[in-house]
Image (spheres, helix red, strand yellow):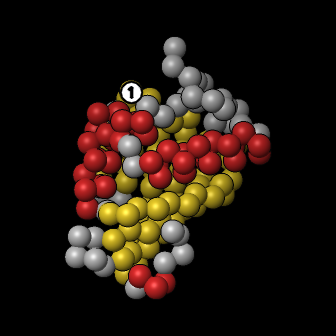
Amino acid sequence: MEQRHPLPPFTLETALQKVQAAEDAWNTRNPEKIAKAYTVDSEWRNRTSFLNGRKEIEAFLENKWATELDYKLKKELWGFRGNRMAVRFEYEYRNDAGQWFRAYGNENWEFDENGLMQKRYASINDLEINESERKLK
């Protein structure tokens, strides 16, 4: 059986580890690696996209990073209980025309007993910024 440590129920220490592991993985921009942190039938809502399963997650991430260039992400634990977490995040990227953006959002996560994320609900807003306003490099 696949497992992704730390496993729920989470403590403050293990919740912080889980968030850091997610941040580190997403900053690799490797869709295949990232998708392995989710259950094979994981449910996602990302903005207005609704995804089901690793294959859809992987394809979504490939498309995301084809247009969100020089992506850099920071995640922060907002709260946790049992097998659920709330996370605040921001990331920066530029489009192919060179315009920079900072995206802000919140995610709700639910994990199975093996530490794989079975549900991810993300709400995200984008803000155009100048390159000189970047905080994440």
Residue 67, position as x, y percentages in the image = 26, 62
Residue 121, position as x, y percentages in the image = 45, 50
Q: Is residue 94 left or right of residue 24?
A: left
At horizontal 61% and vertical 48% (from top left) the residue drawn is 19
| Outermost residue to the top | 1
Q: Is residue 123 above or below residue 111?
A: below
Asked which secondary structure carries label 1, the reply is strand
Label 1: how many Cα within 10 Å (few below 14, some 14–19, many 20+) = some
The amino acid pointed to by label 1 is Val
Q: Is residue 73 visible?
A: yes
At horizontal 54% and vertical 48% (from top left) the residue drawn is 24
Residue 5, position as x, y percentages in the image = 63, 30
At horizontal 55% and vertical 39% (from top left) the residue drawn is 110
At horizontal 30% and vertical 55% (from top left) the residue drawn is 64
Q: Is residue 105 visible?
A: no
Residue 94: image quadrant is bottom left
Residue under label 1: 40
Q: Is residue 72 left or right of residue 51?
A: right
